[in-house]
Image: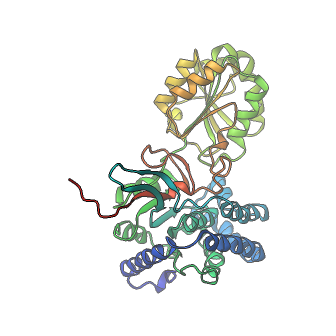
């Protein structure tokens, strides 16, 4: 682990050493049996619970200091660890241990007419550099997924969560060597100097993939500076569309869950679109319930005719990831209009249709181009754990290599293996 803060005399040299150690560790990790990696995950899970008082005390320091960093209530919620959240984090390690090890999976195999045995197998990417903000759970999720998929992890959390991240990292690192894994399989960059990120992003000879998780400005900075591929999404401008045939009670439950359960996360709904046929019945009821839960509604002209209490919507609201209890609301004349609106304003993250018409559902699924398209369920299900990946390392809205929640398989690549007995090409 990097020496903390003032102890760093030559940051560039220290970053180079971290990356070089990670590369060496990745070569050993690529050969580690699944049983060894699972043993580490299980022991780390137990240790997280055994040392929960230590972790929660360090987290309390970060939460107390959060207002001085300008964190809003949603960001403080992401930062806060509770006994239940810590138990969920520990349980996620057990879940990852129970997943199939992707390393060595044979994707395709054939025998060529010339006698060559050809196969395509799954292999680790190598070294993954994770940059994230006030989300201490990412420290554990990223380490677990990287090690299980045979990758070394370099973790760089935000200054707002420094005490929490250090406490979680110590628990994870303390179990590595005892389980037969290289001690630098997981490293935490403990300096709050932002220059460290730039130095590490300039080391493609050691680091194979960068993954930023946080606000749009962080992600754009990483994309601009990185000299290696970046797995990312910029924003989560997610939509819920209530079709003409939607079950009213179901639609209300879905939009409330999508917006209110955790408004500060990327898979929370930011826009509600309602078919004009259903709007007069649905919108007043939904608006009353949402406003009763503290949601500020910003409506277009048609929706404000039905619910005058809504704030007037500004054009920029259609493109805003609020990450708060704020919801843009609009009335559309048709399913096609909803699809066109989403095409113009979506960030490609998650879109939902609530409908009882199978034909409408199928058209929406086929037409909407996002990492997850959901029928009759909350936007909040675009999540690695909810979709069966165990923990996730992030959600990608890119279309190359990985899209949507990224778990173990998305942290691997492939290589071709060919066995011959002296064949030469003619």
Q: How many marks?
A: 0
Residue 174 vertical placement versus 135 (above, below)? below
Q: Position of residue 47 (x, y in %)?
A: 73, 76
Residue 298 vertical placement versus 7 (above, below)? above
In the displayed structure, does residue 201 sit left or right of residue 422? right
Q: Is residue 235 visible?
A: yes
Identify the coloring: rainbow
Judging depth in this view, the residue of 383 and 272 nearest the camera is: 383
Residue furthest left as drawn: 426
Q: Tell me what residue is drawn at x 59 percent, y 47 percent.
A: 266
- Give residue 424's quadrant in the image: bottom left
Judging depth in this view, the residue of 426 and 240 nearest the camera is: 426
Residue 129 vertical placement versus 365 (above, below)? below
Q: Tell me what residue is drawn at x 38 percent, y 77 percent.
A: 16
- Give residue 390's quadrant in the image: bottom right
Q: Position of residue 59 (x, y in %)?
A: 69, 70
Q: Position of residue 356 (x, y in %)?
A: 71, 21
In the displayed structure, does residue 409 sit left or right of residue 94? left
Q: Position of residue 328 (x, y in %)?
A: 60, 32
Q: Tell me what residue is drawn at x 61 percent, y 61 percent.
A: 135
Q: Is residue 164 visible?
A: no
Q: Tell me what residue is drawn at x 39 percent, y 79 percent.
A: 11
């Amino acid at each position: 682990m990097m020496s903390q803060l003032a102890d760093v005399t030559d940051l560039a040299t220290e970053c180079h050493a971290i990356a070089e150690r990670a590369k060496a560790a990745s070569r050993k990790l690529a050969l580690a049996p699944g049983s060894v990696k699972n043993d580490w995950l299980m022991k780390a899970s137990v240790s997280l619970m055994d040392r929960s008082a230590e972790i929660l005390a360090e987290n309390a320091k970060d939460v107390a200091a959060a207002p001085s960093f300008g964190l809003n209530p949603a960001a403080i919620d992401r930062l806060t660890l509770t006994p239940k959240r810590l138990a969920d984090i520990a349980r996620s390690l057990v879940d990852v241990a129970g997943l199939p090890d992707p390393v060595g999976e044979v994707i395709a195999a054939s025998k060529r007419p010339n006698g060559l045995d050809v196969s395509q197998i799954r292999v680790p990417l190598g070294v993954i550099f994770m940059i994230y903000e006030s989300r201490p759970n990412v420290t554990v999720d990223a380490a677990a997924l990287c090690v299980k998929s045979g990758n070394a992890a370099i973790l760089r959390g935000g200054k707002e969560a420094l005490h929490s991240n250090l406490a979680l990292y110590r628990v994870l690192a303390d179990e590595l060597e005892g389980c037969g894994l290289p001690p630098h399989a997981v490293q935490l960059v403990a300096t709050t100097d932002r220059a460290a990120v730039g130095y590490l992003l300039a080391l493609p000879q050691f680091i194979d993939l960068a993954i930023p998780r946080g606000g749009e400005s962080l992600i754009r900075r990483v994309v601009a500076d990185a000299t290696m591929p970046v797995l990312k999404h910029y924003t989560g401008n997610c939509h819920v569309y209530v079709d003409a045939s939607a079950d009213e009670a179901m639609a209300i439950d879905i939009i409330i869950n999508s917006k209110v359960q955790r408004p500060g996360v990327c898979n929370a709904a930011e826009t509600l679109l309602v078919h004009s046929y259903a709007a007069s019945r649905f919108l007043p009821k939904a608006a009353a319930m949402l406003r009763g839960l503290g949601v500020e509604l910003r409506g277009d002209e048609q929706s404000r005719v039905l619910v005058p209490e809504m704030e007037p919507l500004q054009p920029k609201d259609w493109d805003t990831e609020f990450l708060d209890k704020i919801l843009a609301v609009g009335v559309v004349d048709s399913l096609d209009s909803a699809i066109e609106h989403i095409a113009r304003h979506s960030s490609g993250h998650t879109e939902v249709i609530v409908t009882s018409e199978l034909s409408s559902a199928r058209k929406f699924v086929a037409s909407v181009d996002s990492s997850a398209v959901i029928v009759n369920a909350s936007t909040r299900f675009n999540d690695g754990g909810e979709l069966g990946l165990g923990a996730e390392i992030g959600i990608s809205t890119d279309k190359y290599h990985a899209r949507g929640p990224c778990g173990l398989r998305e942290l691997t690549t492939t290589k071709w293996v060919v066995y011959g007995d002296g064949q030469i090409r003619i």
